[in-house]
Amino acid sequence: LDLQWNGFSREIPTQLGRMTKLSINFLLGENNFCGMVPTEVQALSSNVESWTWSVTDGNPNLGMECPKILTDPPTTSPTSTPIPTSSPTYCGPGYFEDQGCSLCPLGRFNGGDSAPICFVCSAGR
């Protein structure tokens, strides 16, 4: 199992300890794991060839508490009622939405409906 250099973070999953038949290449090094190495994973080290066991190498945050994951950002101000807006303007091809429907200037185009900008024409078009 070679999971080195993948940028993994958070705790090492305890489920990896279920790989009891593994005898070579348990490689988790060079990631960003944090927390403690689960005892289930530690127990595998006696089954795996020592020269193919890499768990703590390159994981400087192992043994340190993992940062908390915020599910919702903290609110610093009271929530407000949404301000009603006018219905959207739908502009046809060649026009763009700019507080109304403006014609695209020479050398620019808008091939879709209700695009907010005009695009520059490629050379020869």
Image: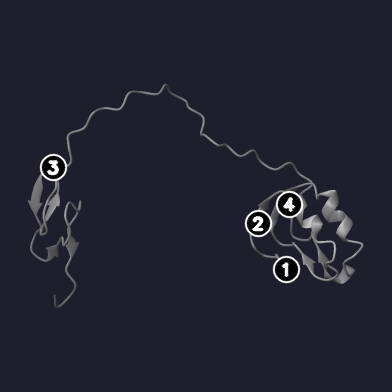
Label 3 with label 1: CB-CB less than 8 Å = no
Label 3 with label 2: CB-CB less than 8 Å = no
Residue 2's disc number: 1
Q: How many marks?
A: 4
Q: Is residue 38 left or right of residue 119?
A: right
Residue tagged 4: 13
User: The residue under label 3 is which amino acid type?
Assistant: Gln
Q: Position of residue 53 (x, y in %)?
A: 83, 66
Mark with earlier residue (3, 1): 1
Q: Position of residue 47 (x, y in %)?
A: 90, 65
Q: Quadrant of the C terminus?
A: bottom left
Of 98 and 2, which appears nearest the observer? Answer: 2
Q: Position of residue 96 (x, y in %)?
A: 14, 52
Which residue shows up at 80% across the image and 61% down it?
A: 19
Q: Quadrant of the N terminus?
A: bottom right
Mark with earlier residue (1, 4): 1
Residue 11's disc number: none
Mark yes or no: residue 98 visible: yes
Tell me the colour scheme of the image: one colour
Residue 99's disc number: 3
Residue 8's disc number: 2
